[in-house]
């Protein structure tokens, strides 16, 4: 194979920034190159190429970076366009010949090589490299043409057309792919490849029925065609026809093919079915065949192996596969993205994902969703937004079936899309999917907390409900909480009553319970309907030994004022002190369902929960969570210094917790 020849550049020692067009985009790309972020630079160049298709420098830089990164697709894209833009330059066609060879497109390489030799017969330096390979290619392709039963006098053109289809597909020119594939089918209707390629293009363009029809046509020609079996498995799975997809996948597992990507196509289809064990079996087969590592290594297969290993709990093995994929093709960002995700703390990970959202949902369907819902967002009407989402689902019902799939194994964009779609539709089916996601270990904690918030705001889950929740990579029990916390008090007694009650609080702090009772009694005379003054009067009485009367008064107060948090918390602590665990639990459950708290109310509630989980229903982790919540929203609460020492699993800690409420024991 000839080596790629770069166009000669003057000022070889000058930095790249001096050689580039000084446009804003190219300067940004230059900065990426200087920073060593070559894969990102290539991606930006591909985007820029769409806007500047006639800009030679864009494709020159892309070509050079593709050589550096061994990015075959970018190399081919740049080489094709440079040969079109500068058709008079021999080196452009020489490099195109090499790019076709590297991308295993021998027919296009042969045609390009013959063109070069006929146009520049005297270019001895470049021509010598090509001449020998052209002769070898012609001999090999002629033999292949006989096997494929191609016309003896025109065997090259169908082969060239076949590879043009592959190029168009790889460069996302899907309408062109279908057009070229149809031309090829008209010439060689028994040839499976154009049907396979046309089916992929049809699927991406949103024509699912045409895609599946082409895949089935291939299986009529060749019942064991690996590409058709793999594609059809995917199409059926994503069309919510899971039993049929599994049936085709079983045929795929036993199918054989001399094609180099046979292992990748098998692993790809099985990945759509979440058949992790099946994927690793295929990987082992590829390894035995010598096709997993080395020159034949496919970064996508290695990536899928990493995903399967990760979901089977083999993180060390997954990391090895992803590192190998990233080393094999540095521009293959999916493997590196999964490695980066694995390095995050458990609660921040998205989890291993095999595909991106456009692999699960065709580009056309995803774009239609964005455009449809985007117009409704602009209207600033939630009703319009939900209506647009529902119309989209009515038109494409199979998309809703992908929601739980994306919530489990989607990439970050796909998982976010699935959750927002379910929230917008808000049907019973969608709500059930959100609930399942809430209780699952999938995705980062933050996104599942977002699901919980949605369910609470829509009264689907009430405050205080006990939930199974994965936090920081471990399953735990949490209480649903969606509270408003502020300085708004339960009531506002008259100013004169507040002034007298303030003296009662001062007496409380000094332990003068008789004086406190006296002041609260006077304040109550001034404000006989004040629940807070009556509550504190009962506290003063209880601390003087009148516990039975005080608790009876509190129970009556709780019946008349069921939303007064302080009284329920005090009754819960009284129940704990007297070993009435279930009564305490019910009291605290009542408070947990409240939607609004004053800061002092929530502090008292947290304190009660801490003590409950130390001595009532021992759960040190739960006690710590309540203490952390308390510290977070009221860090200066003096009661924290009293309660912190009892948060432990030692006998001393439990004894300390009991001591805090011993005065309530009857």
Image: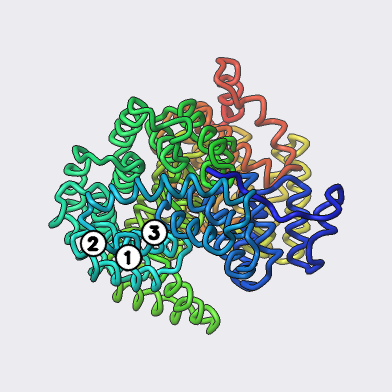
Residue for point 74% across, 34% down:
511
Residue for point 23% across, 53% down:
148
**Cα–Cα span, label 1 and label 2:** 31 Å
What residue did someone put label 1 on?
203
**Cα–Cα span, label 1 and label 3:** 20 Å
Task: Give percent across and percent down for residue 215.
Answer: 22, 59
Residue for point 18% across, 42% down:
250
What residue did someone put label 2 on?
151
Task: Give percent across and percent down for residue 69.
Answer: 61, 44
What residue did someone put label 3 on?
163
Q: Nearer the viewer, mark 1 or mark 3?
A: 3
Tag 2 or tag 1, which sits nearer the N-term? 2
Q: Secondary structure at mark 3?
A: helix
Residue 296 visible in the shown view: yes
Tag 3 or tag 1, which sits nearer the N-term? 3
Task: Give percent across and percent down for residue 406.
Answer: 39, 54
Residue in front for this viewpoint, 597 or 7: 7
Residue 465 visible in the shown view: no
State the image quarter where residue 456 is shown. Answer: bottom left
């Amino acid at each position: 194979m000839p080596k790629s020849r770069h166009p000669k550049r003057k000022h070889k020692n000058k930095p790249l920034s001096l050689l580039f067009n000084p446009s804003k985009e190219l300067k940004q790309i230059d900065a990426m190159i200087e920073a060593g972020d070559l894969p990102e630079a290539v991606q930006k160049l591909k985007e820029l190429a769409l806007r500047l298709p006639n800009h030679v420098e864009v494709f020159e830089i892309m070509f050079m970076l593709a050589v550096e990164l061994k990015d075959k697709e970018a190399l081919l894209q740049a080489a094709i366009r440079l040969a079109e833009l500068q058709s008079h330059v021999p080196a452009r066609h020489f490099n195109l010949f090499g790019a076709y060879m590297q991308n295993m497109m021998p027919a296009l390489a042969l045609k390009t090589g013959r063109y070069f030799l006929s146009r520049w017969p005297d270019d001895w330096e470049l021509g010598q490299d090509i001449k020998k390979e052209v002769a070898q290619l012609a001999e090999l392709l002629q033999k292949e043409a006989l096997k494929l039963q191609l016309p003896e006098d025109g065997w090259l053109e169908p082969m060239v057309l076949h590879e043009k289809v592959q190029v168009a597909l790889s460069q996302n020119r899907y309408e062109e792919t279908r057009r070229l594939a149809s031309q090829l089918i008209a010439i060689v209707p028994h040839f499976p490849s154009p049907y396979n390629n046309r089916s992929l293009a049809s699927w991406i363009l949103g024509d699912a029925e045409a895609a599946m029809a082409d895949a089935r046509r291939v299986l009529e020609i060749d019942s064991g065609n690996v590409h058709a079996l793999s594609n059809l498995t995917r199409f059926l799975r994503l069309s919510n026809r899971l039993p049929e997809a599994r049936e085709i996948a079983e045929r795929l597992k036993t199918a054989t093919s001399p094609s180099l990507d046979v292992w990748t196509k098998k692993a790809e289809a099985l990945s759509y079915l979440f058949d992790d064990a099946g994927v690793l079996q295929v990987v082992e087969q590829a390894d035995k065949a010598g096709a997993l590592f080395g020159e034949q290594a496919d970064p996508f297969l290695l990536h899928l192996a990493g995903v399967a290993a990760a979901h089977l709990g083999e993180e060390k093995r997954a990391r090895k596969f992803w590192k190998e994929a990233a080393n094999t093709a540095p521009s293959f960002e999916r493997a590196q993205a999964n490695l980066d995700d694995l390095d995050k703390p458990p609660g921040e990970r998205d989890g291993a994902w095999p595909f991106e959202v456009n692999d699960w949902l065709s580009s056309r369907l995803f774009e239609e969703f964005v455009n449809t819902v985007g117009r409704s967002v602009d209207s600033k009407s939630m009703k319009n937004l939900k209506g647009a989402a529902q119309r989209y689902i009515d038109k494409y019902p199979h998309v809703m079936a992908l929601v739980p799939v994306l919530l489990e194994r989607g990439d970050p964009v796909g998982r976010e899309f699935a959750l927002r779609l379910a929230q917008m539709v808000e049907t019973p089916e969608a709500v059930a999917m959100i609930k399942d996601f809430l209780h699952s270990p999938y995705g980062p904690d933050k996104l599942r907390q977002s699901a919980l918030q949605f369910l609470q705001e829509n009264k689907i889950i009430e405050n205080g409900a006990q939930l199974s929740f994965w936090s920081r990579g471990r399953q735990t029990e949490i209480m649903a909480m969606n509270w408003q916390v502020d300085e708004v008090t339960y009531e506002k007694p008259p100013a004169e009553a507040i002034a007298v009650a303030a003296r009662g609080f001062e007496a409380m702090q000094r332990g003068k319970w008789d004086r406190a009772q006296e002041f609260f009694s006077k304040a109550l005379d001034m404000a006989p309907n004040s629940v807070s003054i009556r509550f504190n009067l009962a506290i003063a009485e209880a601390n003087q030994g009148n516990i039975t009367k005080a608790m009876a008064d509190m129970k009556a107060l709780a019946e008349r004022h069921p939303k007064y948090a302080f009284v329920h918390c005090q009754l819960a602590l009284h129940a704990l002190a007297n070993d009435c665990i279930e009564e305490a639990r019910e009291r605290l459950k009542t408070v947990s369902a409240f939607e609004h708290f004053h800061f002092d109310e929530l502090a008292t509630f947290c304190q009660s929960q801490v003590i409950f989980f130390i001595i009532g229903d021992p759960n040190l982790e739960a006690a710590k969570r309540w203490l952390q919540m308390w510290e977070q929203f009221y860090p200066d609460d003096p009661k924290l210094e009293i309660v912190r020492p009892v948060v432990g699993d030692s006998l001393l800690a439990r004894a300390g917790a009991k001591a805090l409420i011993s005065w309530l024991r009857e």
